[in-house]
Amino acid sequence: MAGALSHIRVLDLSRVLAGPWAGQMLADFGAEVIKVERPGCGDDTRGWGPPFFSDNEGNPTEAAYFHAANRNKRSVAIDIASEAGQNLIREMVKQCDVVLENFKVGCLAKYGLDYASLKQVNPAIVYCSITGFGQDGPYAQRAGYDFMIQGMGGLMSVTGEPEGMPMKVGVALADVMTGLYAANAVQAALLNRAETGKGQYIDLSLLDVQVATLANQAMNFLASGDSPARLGNAHPNIVPYQAFGTTDGHIILAVGNDKQFRTFCEIGGNPALGENPAFATNRKRVENRDDLIPQVAEIIAQQSTNWWLEQLSAACVPCGPINTIEQVFADPQVQHREMQVELEHPKAGKVAGVGNPVKFSETPVEYRSAPPMLGQHTEQVLTDLLKMENDVLEGLRQSGVIA
Protein backbone atom coordinates (compact mmCIF):
# COMPACT_ATOMS: atom_id res chain seq x y z
CA MET A 1 0.00 0.00 0.00
CA ALA A 2 1.19 3.49 -0.83
CA GLY A 3 1.90 5.85 2.06
CA ALA A 4 -0.64 8.49 2.99
CA LEU A 5 1.54 11.22 1.44
CA SER A 6 2.88 9.22 -1.51
CA HIS A 7 1.48 11.86 -3.89
CA ILE A 8 3.52 14.65 -2.25
CA ARG A 9 7.05 15.77 -3.13
CA VAL A 10 9.06 17.78 -0.60
CA LEU A 11 12.20 19.83 -1.25
CA ASP A 12 14.06 19.85 2.06
CA LEU A 13 16.58 22.70 2.24
CA SER A 14 16.92 22.38 6.01
CA ARG A 15 19.72 21.01 8.13
CA VAL A 16 20.55 19.98 11.70
CA LEU A 17 17.37 18.82 13.50
CA ALA A 18 14.05 20.73 13.50
CA GLY A 19 13.63 20.93 9.71
CA PRO A 20 15.06 17.48 8.97
CA TRP A 21 12.79 15.99 11.69
CA ALA A 22 9.78 17.44 9.88
CA GLY A 23 11.09 16.14 6.56
CA GLN A 24 11.62 12.67 7.98
CA MET A 25 8.10 12.61 9.39
CA LEU A 26 6.65 13.52 5.99
CA ALA A 27 8.90 10.93 4.34
CA ASP A 28 7.79 8.24 6.81
CA PHE A 29 4.22 9.04 5.82
CA GLY A 30 5.09 8.33 2.21
CA ALA A 31 6.19 11.67 0.76
CA GLU A 32 9.12 11.82 -1.63
CA VAL A 33 11.64 14.00 0.20
CA ILE A 34 14.62 15.42 -1.66
CA LYS A 35 17.28 16.73 0.72
CA VAL A 36 19.41 19.52 -0.75
CA GLU A 37 22.88 19.76 0.78
CA ARG A 38 26.02 21.81 0.27
CA PRO A 39 28.62 20.02 -1.87
CA GLY A 40 31.64 18.82 0.06
CA CYS A 41 30.26 18.92 3.58
CA GLY A 42 26.48 18.58 3.54
CA ASP A 43 24.29 18.75 6.62
CA ASP A 44 26.32 19.81 9.68
CA THR A 45 25.13 16.78 11.64
CA ARG A 46 26.92 14.37 9.29
CA GLY A 47 30.01 15.22 11.34
CA TRP A 48 28.43 15.55 14.79
CA GLY A 49 30.09 12.53 16.37
CA PRO A 50 31.31 10.19 17.60
CA PRO A 51 29.61 7.83 17.43
CA PHE A 52 29.65 7.22 13.68
CA PHE A 53 28.38 4.38 11.56
CA SER A 54 31.22 2.71 9.68
CA ASP A 55 31.74 0.85 6.41
CA ASN A 56 33.15 -2.68 6.13
CA GLU A 57 36.72 -1.39 6.48
CA GLY A 58 35.89 0.52 9.64
CA ASN A 59 35.91 3.94 7.99
CA PRO A 60 33.28 6.33 9.39
CA THR A 61 30.34 7.19 7.15
CA GLU A 62 27.96 9.57 8.95
CA ALA A 63 27.36 10.42 12.59
CA ALA A 64 24.57 8.66 14.44
CA TYR A 65 23.07 12.13 14.96
CA PHE A 66 22.50 12.54 11.21
CA HIS A 67 20.76 9.16 11.12
CA ALA A 68 18.23 10.35 13.70
CA ALA A 69 16.39 12.63 11.25
CA ASN A 70 17.14 11.74 7.63
CA ARG A 71 15.84 8.31 6.66
CA ASN A 72 13.62 7.78 3.62
CA LYS A 73 15.17 10.79 1.85
CA ARG A 74 17.24 11.29 -1.29
CA SER A 75 20.28 13.57 -1.13
CA VAL A 76 21.30 15.99 -3.87
CA ALA A 77 24.39 18.15 -3.48
CA ILE A 78 23.79 21.60 -4.99
CA ASP A 79 25.64 24.86 -4.39
CA ILE A 80 22.76 27.29 -3.87
CA ALA A 81 25.20 30.19 -3.60
CA SER A 82 25.82 29.85 -7.34
CA GLU A 83 23.44 31.23 -9.95
CA ALA A 84 23.29 27.87 -11.71
CA GLY A 85 22.48 26.17 -8.39
CA GLN A 86 19.69 28.64 -7.72
CA ASN A 87 18.26 27.95 -11.15
CA LEU A 88 18.27 24.23 -10.39
CA ILE A 89 16.34 24.81 -7.16
CA ARG A 90 13.76 26.94 -8.96
CA GLU A 91 13.28 24.27 -11.60
CA MET A 92 12.87 21.63 -8.90
CA VAL A 93 10.33 23.77 -7.04
CA LYS A 94 8.12 23.66 -10.13
CA GLN A 95 7.86 19.90 -9.56
CA CYS A 96 7.39 20.01 -5.78
CA ASP A 97 4.52 20.52 -3.34
CA VAL A 98 6.46 21.61 -0.25
CA VAL A 99 9.65 23.49 0.58
CA LEU A 100 11.22 23.18 4.04
CA GLU A 101 14.01 25.57 5.07
CA ASN A 102 15.63 26.83 8.26
CA PHE A 103 17.97 29.57 7.06
CA LYS A 104 18.32 32.84 8.93
CA VAL A 105 15.66 35.46 8.23
CA GLY A 106 16.22 37.02 4.80
CA CYS A 107 19.09 34.71 3.87
CA LEU A 108 17.34 32.95 0.98
CA ALA A 109 15.94 36.19 -0.45
CA LYS A 110 19.39 37.16 -1.72
CA TYR A 111 19.41 33.92 -3.71
CA GLY A 112 15.89 34.37 -5.03
CA LEU A 113 14.80 31.27 -3.09
CA ASP A 114 12.48 32.91 -0.54
CA TYR A 115 8.73 32.35 -0.58
CA ALA A 116 7.95 35.57 -2.45
CA SER A 117 10.25 34.47 -5.26
CA LEU A 118 9.34 30.80 -5.39
CA LYS A 119 5.58 31.31 -5.34
CA GLN A 120 6.06 33.12 -8.67
CA VAL A 121 7.54 29.86 -9.95
CA ASN A 122 4.92 27.65 -8.28
CA PRO A 123 1.88 29.47 -6.80
CA ALA A 124 0.67 26.24 -5.18
CA ILE A 125 3.85 25.69 -3.17
CA VAL A 126 3.59 25.21 0.61
CA TYR A 127 6.70 26.88 2.00
CA CYS A 128 7.67 26.30 5.65
CA SER A 129 10.36 28.47 7.26
CA ILE A 130 11.79 27.42 10.62
CA THR A 131 13.85 29.93 12.59
CA GLY A 132 14.85 30.54 16.18
CA PHE A 133 12.55 33.51 16.74
CA GLY A 134 10.27 33.90 13.73
CA GLN A 135 10.27 36.22 10.73
CA ASP A 136 9.51 39.39 12.68
CA GLY A 137 9.93 40.94 16.11
CA PRO A 138 12.97 42.32 17.98
CA TYR A 139 14.83 38.97 17.97
CA ALA A 140 14.12 37.99 14.37
CA GLN A 141 17.73 38.40 13.22
CA ARG A 142 19.20 36.31 16.03
CA ALA A 143 20.37 32.75 15.54
CA GLY A 144 18.47 30.26 17.69
CA TYR A 145 19.68 26.93 19.06
CA ASP A 146 17.73 24.41 21.09
CA PHE A 147 19.68 24.85 24.34
CA MET A 148 19.22 28.62 24.46
CA ILE A 149 15.56 28.26 23.45
CA GLN A 150 14.93 25.84 26.33
CA GLY A 151 16.34 28.54 28.61
CA MET A 152 14.62 31.56 27.04
CA GLY A 153 11.33 29.71 26.62
CA GLY A 154 10.97 28.78 30.29
CA LEU A 155 11.55 25.02 30.09
CA MET A 156 14.79 25.14 32.10
CA SER A 157 13.11 27.17 34.82
CA VAL A 158 10.91 24.18 35.66
CA THR A 159 13.52 21.46 35.05
CA GLY A 160 15.98 20.33 37.74
CA GLU A 161 16.17 20.13 41.49
CA PRO A 162 14.80 23.09 43.49
CA GLU A 163 18.20 24.07 44.89
CA GLY A 164 20.27 22.98 41.89
CA MET A 165 21.24 24.59 38.62
CA PRO A 166 18.45 24.89 36.03
CA MET A 167 18.78 21.95 33.62
CA LYS A 168 18.02 21.44 29.97
CA VAL A 169 16.17 18.33 28.88
CA GLY A 170 18.50 15.52 27.81
CA VAL A 171 17.46 15.68 24.14
CA ALA A 172 16.99 18.72 21.88
CA LEU A 173 13.30 18.81 22.67
CA ALA A 174 12.57 22.30 21.32
CA ASP A 175 13.97 21.22 17.95
CA VAL A 176 12.04 17.94 17.93
CA MET A 177 8.76 19.58 18.91
CA THR A 178 9.25 22.27 16.28
CA GLY A 179 9.77 19.54 13.69
CA LEU A 180 6.51 17.91 14.75
CA TYR A 181 4.63 21.22 14.59
CA ALA A 182 6.13 21.84 11.15
CA ALA A 183 4.98 18.46 9.85
CA ASN A 184 1.49 19.13 11.22
CA ALA A 185 1.38 22.61 9.71
CA VAL A 186 2.54 21.40 6.30
CA GLN A 187 -0.16 18.73 6.20
CA ALA A 188 -2.82 21.27 7.23
CA ALA A 189 -1.66 23.61 4.46
CA LEU A 190 -1.79 20.75 1.95
CA LEU A 191 -5.35 19.94 3.00
CA ASN A 192 -6.29 23.60 2.54
CA ARG A 193 -4.61 23.62 -0.86
CA ALA A 194 -6.68 20.59 -1.89
CA GLU A 195 -9.80 22.68 -1.23
CA THR A 196 -8.65 26.07 -2.53
CA GLY A 197 -5.80 25.34 -4.93
CA LYS A 198 -3.66 27.89 -3.05
CA GLY A 199 -0.28 27.33 -1.46
CA GLN A 200 0.85 29.34 1.54
CA TYR A 201 3.72 30.41 3.75
CA ILE A 202 4.33 28.92 7.22
CA ASP A 203 6.39 30.95 9.72
CA LEU A 204 7.45 28.72 12.60
CA SER A 205 9.86 29.58 15.41
CA LEU A 206 11.55 27.48 18.05
CA LEU A 207 10.76 30.05 20.76
CA ASP A 208 7.05 30.10 19.87
CA VAL A 209 6.94 26.31 20.00
CA GLN A 210 8.75 26.19 23.32
CA VAL A 211 6.30 28.68 24.83
CA ALA A 212 3.33 26.78 23.39
CA THR A 213 4.52 23.48 24.83
CA LEU A 214 4.90 24.77 28.36
CA ALA A 215 1.38 23.34 28.55
CA ASN A 216 0.02 23.15 32.12
CA GLN A 217 2.99 25.05 33.54
CA ALA A 218 2.15 28.06 31.36
CA MET A 219 -1.48 27.85 32.40
CA ASN A 220 -0.50 27.55 36.07
CA PHE A 221 1.24 30.92 35.69
CA LEU A 222 -1.54 32.55 33.68
CA ALA A 223 -4.15 31.44 36.21
CA SER A 224 -2.21 32.40 39.33
CA GLY A 225 0.34 35.03 38.34
CA ASP A 226 3.03 32.97 40.06
CA SER A 227 5.94 31.56 38.04
CA PRO A 228 6.21 27.79 38.60
CA ALA A 229 9.40 26.72 40.35
CA ARG A 230 11.66 23.74 39.81
CA LEU A 231 10.36 20.68 41.61
CA GLY A 232 12.90 18.06 40.56
CA ASN A 233 10.94 14.94 39.65
CA ALA A 234 7.76 16.12 41.37
CA HIS A 235 4.63 17.37 39.61
CA PRO A 236 3.18 20.83 40.27
CA ASN A 237 -0.46 19.69 40.13
CA ILE A 238 -0.48 16.00 41.17
CA VAL A 239 0.83 14.32 44.35
CA PRO A 240 2.41 11.80 44.71
CA TYR A 241 3.80 11.91 41.17
CA GLN A 242 7.59 11.59 41.25
CA ALA A 243 10.56 9.25 41.68
CA PHE A 244 11.25 7.51 44.98
CA GLY A 245 14.14 5.42 46.25
CA THR A 246 13.67 1.68 46.82
CA THR A 247 15.98 -0.80 48.54
CA ASP A 248 17.91 -1.32 45.30
CA GLY A 249 17.20 1.64 43.04
CA HIS A 250 14.33 3.94 42.13
CA ILE A 251 10.74 3.77 41.01
CA ILE A 252 8.38 6.29 39.48
CA LEU A 253 5.03 6.50 41.27
CA ALA A 254 2.45 8.35 39.15
CA VAL A 255 -0.76 8.46 41.17
CA GLY A 256 -3.49 10.00 39.03
CA ASN A 257 -6.56 9.81 41.27
CA ASP A 258 -7.67 9.29 44.85
CA LYS A 259 -8.54 5.59 44.45
CA GLN A 260 -5.04 4.88 43.16
CA PHE A 261 -3.58 6.63 46.19
CA ARG A 262 -5.65 4.57 48.60
CA THR A 263 -4.62 1.39 46.77
CA PHE A 264 -0.96 2.37 47.01
CA CYS A 265 -1.30 2.92 50.76
CA GLU A 266 -2.95 -0.48 51.20
CA ILE A 267 -0.19 -2.23 49.25
CA GLY A 268 2.41 -0.35 51.29
CA GLY A 269 0.87 -1.54 54.54
CA ASN A 270 -0.47 1.84 55.67
CA PRO A 271 -4.15 2.07 54.67
CA ALA A 272 -4.73 4.79 57.28
CA LEU A 273 -2.57 7.15 55.27
CA GLY A 274 -4.97 6.86 52.35
CA GLU A 275 -7.95 7.65 54.57
CA ASN A 276 -6.34 10.61 56.32
CA PRO A 277 -8.46 13.71 55.49
CA ALA A 278 -5.26 15.70 54.95
CA PHE A 279 -4.35 13.43 52.02
CA ALA A 280 -7.67 11.96 50.86
CA THR A 281 -8.01 14.16 47.74
CA ASN A 282 -5.43 15.32 45.23
CA ARG A 283 -6.09 18.93 46.16
CA LYS A 284 -5.28 18.16 49.78
CA ARG A 285 -2.23 16.14 48.78
CA VAL A 286 -0.87 19.07 46.76
CA GLU A 287 -1.55 21.49 49.61
CA ASN A 288 0.11 19.13 52.12
CA ARG A 289 2.87 17.89 49.83
CA ASP A 290 5.66 18.58 52.33
CA ASP A 291 4.00 16.43 55.00
CA LEU A 292 3.00 13.59 52.70
CA ILE A 293 6.07 12.99 50.52
CA PRO A 294 8.41 11.93 53.38
CA GLN A 295 5.83 9.34 54.49
CA VAL A 296 5.44 7.97 50.97
CA ALA A 297 9.22 7.85 50.60
CA GLU A 298 9.54 5.88 53.85
CA ILE A 299 6.99 3.31 52.65
CA ILE A 300 8.62 2.81 49.24
CA ALA A 301 12.10 2.52 50.76
CA GLN A 302 11.07 -0.75 52.44
CA GLN A 303 10.86 -2.85 49.25
CA SER A 304 12.80 -3.45 46.03
CA THR A 305 12.06 -1.84 42.69
CA ASN A 306 10.78 -5.09 41.16
CA TRP A 307 8.54 -5.75 44.18
CA TRP A 308 6.86 -2.39 43.75
CA LEU A 309 6.56 -2.74 39.99
CA GLU A 310 4.86 -6.13 40.32
CA GLN A 311 2.53 -5.17 43.18
CA LEU A 312 1.48 -1.77 41.87
CA SER A 313 1.09 -2.87 38.25
CA ALA A 314 -1.12 -5.77 39.31
CA ALA A 315 -3.33 -3.29 41.17
CA CYS A 316 -3.44 -0.80 38.26
CA VAL A 317 -1.51 1.88 40.11
CA PRO A 318 0.66 3.71 37.52
CA CYS A 319 4.35 3.11 38.11
CA GLY A 320 7.51 2.41 36.18
CA PRO A 321 11.27 1.94 36.30
CA ILE A 322 13.88 4.52 35.28
CA ASN A 323 15.52 2.77 32.35
CA THR A 324 18.80 3.41 30.65
CA ILE A 325 18.46 3.74 26.88
CA GLU A 326 19.97 0.24 26.57
CA GLN A 327 17.19 -1.05 28.81
CA VAL A 328 14.61 0.84 26.75
CA PHE A 329 15.50 -1.05 23.57
CA ALA A 330 15.60 -4.34 25.50
CA ASP A 331 12.11 -3.77 26.93
CA PRO A 332 9.64 -6.36 25.60
CA GLN A 333 6.91 -3.77 25.01
CA VAL A 334 9.27 -1.54 23.01
CA GLN A 335 10.42 -4.56 21.01
CA HIS A 336 6.84 -5.69 20.39
CA ARG A 337 5.97 -2.23 19.06
CA GLU A 338 8.95 -2.44 16.67
CA MET A 339 10.54 0.78 17.85
CA GLN A 340 13.94 -0.39 16.63
CA VAL A 341 14.27 -0.95 12.89
CA GLU A 342 17.05 -1.92 10.49
CA LEU A 343 17.78 -0.16 7.22
CA GLU A 344 20.19 -1.00 4.41
CA HIS A 345 22.91 1.63 4.00
CA PRO A 346 24.99 1.78 0.78
CA LYS A 347 28.31 1.60 2.67
CA ALA A 348 27.60 0.68 6.28
CA GLY A 349 25.36 -2.31 5.53
CA LYS A 350 22.46 -2.80 7.90
CA VAL A 351 22.16 0.11 10.32
CA ALA A 352 19.85 0.42 13.28
CA GLY A 353 17.24 3.17 13.52
CA VAL A 354 14.41 4.29 15.79
CA GLY A 355 10.96 3.42 14.51
CA ASN A 356 8.13 5.85 13.87
CA PRO A 357 5.54 5.68 16.67
CA VAL A 358 2.53 6.21 14.36
CA LYS A 359 0.69 2.98 13.50
CA PHE A 360 -1.65 3.49 10.53
CA SER A 361 -4.19 0.77 9.70
CA GLU A 362 -4.43 1.53 5.97
CA THR A 363 -1.25 3.39 5.03
CA PRO A 364 1.49 1.98 7.28
CA VAL A 365 4.82 3.71 7.67
CA GLU A 366 7.45 2.25 5.34
CA TYR A 367 11.17 2.23 6.05
CA ARG A 368 12.33 2.53 2.47
CA SER A 369 15.92 3.63 2.86
CA ALA A 370 18.62 4.55 5.36
CA PRO A 371 19.76 8.17 5.58
CA PRO A 372 21.56 8.91 2.30
CA MET A 373 25.21 9.51 1.58
CA LEU A 374 25.99 13.12 0.65
CA GLY A 375 24.90 13.66 -2.96
CA GLN A 376 23.99 10.01 -3.36
CA HIS A 377 21.02 10.83 -5.59
CA THR A 378 22.11 14.03 -7.33
CA GLU A 379 22.32 12.55 -10.81
CA GLN A 380 19.23 10.38 -10.34
CA VAL A 381 17.01 13.23 -9.12
CA LEU A 382 18.13 15.76 -11.72
CA THR A 383 17.68 13.19 -14.47
CA ASP A 384 14.26 12.02 -13.29
CA LEU A 385 12.86 15.38 -12.22
CA LEU A 386 14.44 17.82 -14.66
CA LYS A 387 15.22 15.43 -17.56
CA MET A 388 18.84 16.59 -17.66
CA GLU A 389 21.22 15.07 -20.17
CA ASN A 390 24.55 13.57 -19.12
CA ASP A 391 26.64 16.30 -20.75
CA VAL A 392 24.72 19.00 -18.85
CA LEU A 393 25.17 17.14 -15.57
CA GLU A 394 28.87 16.74 -16.24
CA GLY A 395 29.21 20.47 -16.93
CA LEU A 396 27.51 21.31 -13.66
CA ARG A 397 29.73 18.84 -11.85
CA GLN A 398 32.91 20.23 -13.37
CA SER A 399 31.94 23.77 -12.38
CA GLY A 400 31.23 22.71 -8.77
CA VAL A 401 27.52 23.48 -8.88
CA ILE A 402 26.61 19.87 -8.08
CA ALA A 403 28.45 16.92 -6.59
Image (cartoon, helix red, strand yellow):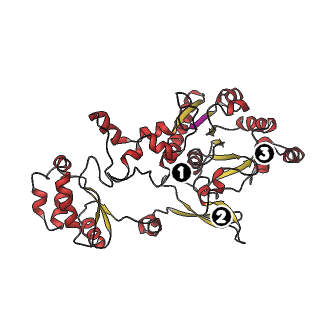
Please rate how many residues cluster around mark 1, counting C-alpha atoms within 10 Å: few if below 14, some from 14 to 19, many from 20. some
Earlier in the chain: of badge 1 and badge 3, it is 1
Q: Main secondary structure of the magenta part?
A: loop
| Amino acid bearing label 3 | Leu
Q: Which mark is residue 344?
A: 2
Q: Horizontal placement of 352 versus 151: left or right?
A: right
Relative to 73, is 132 on the left or the right?
left
Look at 14% across and 68% down and name the residue there. 269
> Would you name the residue on which mark 1 appears?
363
Mark 1 vs mark 3, CA separation in Å? 28 Å
Q: Secondary structure at mark 2?
A: strand
Observer-nearest residue: 367 or 372?
A: 372
Q: Which residues are magenta?
A: 127-139
Q: Earlier in the sequence, mark 3 or mark 2?
A: 2
- What type is the residue that disc 1 sits on? Thr
Residue 282, x across and y down, in percent: 19, 49
Q: Regarding mark 1 in the picture, which secondary structure is present there? A: loop
Foreground label between 1 and 2:
2
Marks 3/2: CA distance? 23 Å
Q: Which residue is mark 3?
A: 382
The residue most toward the right is 391
Look at label 2 and name its amino acid: Glu
Q: Is residue 186 left or right of residue 380?
A: left
Mark with earlier residue (1, 2): 2
Indicate the position of residue 4 as horizontal and vertical percent values.
56, 46
